Image (cartoon, rainbow, N blue to C red):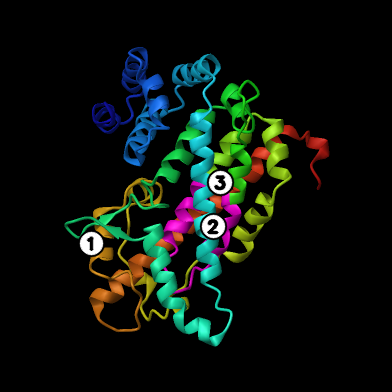
Amino acid sequence: LFTGLSSVLHTQDGDRAMLLWVQNKFDAIGCTQVALRLCSHDSVAVQRQALSLLIALLEGANEGVQNAITVFFKTHKRTSFFRVAHETLVATKDSLKDLKRMLKPKSKAHAKTLSRSVSEHESSLRLFSFDANGNKSDTSVIGRESQVMLLLRLLQLMCAGQYGPLQDLMQKQSSLAISFNLVRACTTLLGAVQPLANNIAGEKDPSTFLVLQTQLLATLCDMVQGPNLENQKEILASSALFDVNRIFSSIKYIQHDMLGVRTSLDAAPTLDNSTHHSDSVLGRESTQEQQMRNSGEFVTSTHTDPTRKSASTQYIVHLNSLIELLKMEALKLCLAFFDSVLDPEIPT
């Protein structure tokens, strides 16, 4: 089902009417309800496919599918979806906090074993994973097609278009026996990934952390637009806006000398913005990126080899594009709070 709907999403690009018709047909035969049930399946692989199907059904903020999801939650009173969603966000936060602690050596003796410990933890996080053919796989714990990224995209689309009924369920589910605060879970995850995304000039490639942080901000933005005052209050009570402030103050655009690269940006190959944003930032990695990662050319170097200089330049362009999108989403989240403020109340 997902393959069929996904093909329509790609072949009918720009044909909103056709996309809406196919989404509604899939929803009418019960795909939405089945996918919601499978989101709490024992198999993580099944969960990911269910999330992917729901994302495809909601693409473009399909209000009919949003209504169907609302009716499902009200009718079945199931806590499993929210429980699994909350557990996924909390588990990701805990893993990132563990990684952050391991990146801080407490002593010289600890520093000697730090590299090995971090590598082992990255292996458990599967930040950088490859398939049987040696190709880059992005189904890692926080990769672009990971469960947490799919979940965040789904939560964003559930709230898209200022859809109040589902926005209200993001913080509490009053009709259920147990309530899960997904807004708070998103803000705490934002706080966990923020320090890792700040390490732009470090040895570790920060792309994955930048992409996760960008998606978190986009999700939080759709949770509060409208405005949804309760979700706004939840975010204001957290440290989320402090994290947003650090995005503007701490995350700088990359210069060549920051990474020890001795090439000129003027000689950098140009990247098509539309392809780069859709395939690289919040979607799958481009073929070019995969080739660069597989060949090890994402490792910056001071060598003067033209091939490596070109790869390093493209890497910097890639990072700066991610940083630009991150700052844009941070700005959108800030602006979303002004929906509930009258002009006279805005400080001059």
Q: Residue at label 1?
A: 291
Queried whether the magenta region covers residue 207, the answer comes back as yes
Q: Is 211 on the left-hand or right-hand side of 273?
A: right
> Dominant secondary structure of the magenta stretch?
helix
Q: Amino acid at mark 1?
A: Gln
Give the crowd class for mark 2: few <14, some 14-19, many >=20 residues within 10 Å.
Answer: many
Name the one closer to the observer, 326 or 68: 68
C-alpha separation, residue under disc 3 versus residue under disc 1? 29 Å
Is 287 on the left or on the right of 226, as rendered?
left
Which is nearer the N-term, disc 2 or disc 1?
2
Residue 284 visible in rendering: yes
Question: Residue beneath label 3, please?
Answer: 217
Q: Position of residue 104 (x, y in %)?
A: 56, 74
Q: Residues within 10 Å of mark 1 (few under 14, many from 20)?
A: some
Distance of label 3 from label 2 (alpha carbons): 12 Å
Residue at 50 percent of width and 64 percent of height: 99
Q: Residue at coordinates 42% horizontally, 57% vertically from top-left?
A: 208
Q: Which residues are magenta?
A: 189-216
The residue depicted at 54 percent of the width and 47 percent of the height is 90
Taking the view exactly as shown, the residue that stands out farthest to the bottom is: 108
Mark 3 / mark 1, whichever is N-terminal: 3
Q: Which amino acid lies under the numbered mark 2 shown in the image of this protein?
A: Val
How far across and how far down the image is residue 89, in percent? 52, 45
Residue with the mark numbered 2: 193
Could you say whether the residue bearing mark 2 is in a helix, strand or loop?
Answer: helix
Residue 105 part of the magenta-drawn span: no
On the picture, is 275 further left or further right than 62? left
Q: Earlier in the sequence, mark 3 or mark 2?
A: 2
Q: Residue furthest left?
A: 133
